[in-house]
Amino acid sequence: MTPDEAGALAEALPGVRRKGHPGHPAWYVDNRLVARLLDAGTLLVRVPMEERDALLAAHPEAFGVPPRFEAHHKVEAYLDDAEPGAVRTALELAWRMQRR
């Protein structure tokens, strides 16, 4: 999956807008972060803590939580290894969590 494909999935969610620097875009709903591109292969996605473990267990090749994010509502999506459906699921979780 490419960063552009991940961005298209995010922008397909109602109310999601792209912001940020062209090299490091981010997607927001109601001015709340849904996802941010960290580099060409890694998308940071906000997910509810209560859903995070299930997401990681279902897609261990696609997602990870580095130590610096363990206490936060975040996962890294590894775009080179992630199926579009897995990334879509994570983005939908983030979108539902961040809507006001």
Image (cartoon, rainbow, N blue to C red):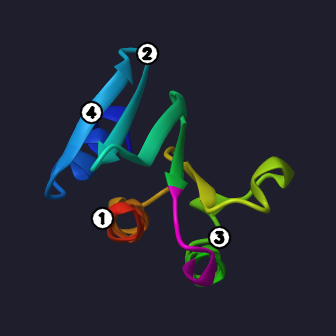
Disc nearest the viewer among 3 and 4: 4
The mark found on residue 79 in the picture is none
**Among the two numbered marks 1 and 3 on one chain, the one whose residue lies closer to the N terminus:** 3
Disc nearest the viewer among 2 and 4: 4
The kind of secondary structure element at disc 2 is: loop
Assess whether mark 4 and mark 3 are in contact (beta carbons under 8 angstroms).
no
**Among the two numbered marks 3 and 2 on one chain, the one whose residue lies closer to the N terminus:** 2
Q: How dense is the environment of label 3, judged by Cα within 10 Å: few (below 14), some, or many (20 and up)?
A: some
Residue 6 visible in the snapshot: no
Q: In this view, does 67 lie above or below 89?
A: above
Q: Distance between the residues labelled 1 and 3?
A: 30 Å
Q: How dense is the environment of label 2, judged by Cα within 10 Å: few (below 14), some, or many (20 and up)?
A: few
The mark found on residue 60 in the picture is 3
**Among the two numbered marks 3 and 4 on one chain, the one whose residue lies closer to the N terminus:** 4
For the residue marked with disc 4, what is the amino acid?
Arg
Residue identifier under label 1: 100
State yes or no: residue 49 in magenta.
yes
Residue 57 visible in the snapshot: yes
Residue identifier under label 4: 18
